[in-house]
Image (cartoon, rainbow, N blue to C red):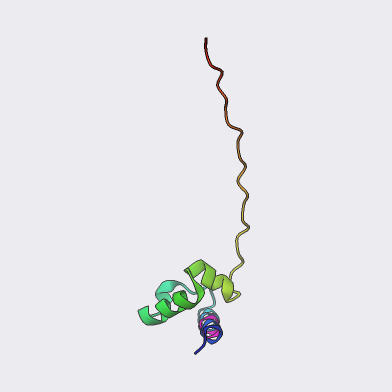
Amino acid sequence: MISEEKKIWAQEVLKQKSDELGRLPKKDDFDEPTRSRIKAFLGPWPRALEAAGLKQAKPVLQKVKKPKKRYKKQQ
C-alpha cells in the first residue's frame, strides 16, 4: 500500500468502528496492531479522529505576549 492508501484505510476503519459503536471510537476499542497502524498512518489519536472526519479540530489559540518589565537602575 502506498501512503495515501494507508491513510484511507485507517480513516475507513475508524469510521466503521464509529458507526458500529454509535460514538467516537476509543483506543481501547481496537487491538494493539490495528491501533498502532492507525496511529502510524494518521498520527496521535485526536488527530486521527480529526483526519477521519469524526471530530472537529480545536481552534488554535494565539498566545498574548506580555511586555517585558524594565527595571530602572538605582543610583
10 drawn magenta? yes
Q: Residue at x 45, y 74 (%)?
A: 39
Left or right of 42, for residue 35: left
Q: Is residue 48 above or below residue 1?
A: above
Q: Residue at x 52, y 9 (%)?
A: 75
- Residue farthest to the left, as pictured: 32
Most prominent secondary structure in the magenta stretch? helix
62 drawn magenta? no
Horizontal and vertical percent for residue 19? 55, 82
Q: Is residue 74 above or below residue 39?
A: above
- Residue farthest to the bottom, as pictured: 1
- Residue farthest to the top, as pictured: 75
Q: Is residue 47 above or below residue 63?
A: below
Q: Residue at x 54, y 72 (%)?
A: 49
Q: Nearer the viewer, residue 22 or 72?
A: 72
Left or right of 59, for residue 33: left
Snapshot quadrant of residue 29 = bottom left
Count of picture labels: 0
Snapshot quadrant of residue 67 = top right
Q: Nearer the viewer, residue 52 or 6?
A: 6
What segment carries the magenta color? 8-13
Q: Nearer the viewer, residue 5 or 48?
A: 5
Horizontal and vertical percent for residue 71? 55, 21
Horizontal and vertical percent for residue 48? 52, 72
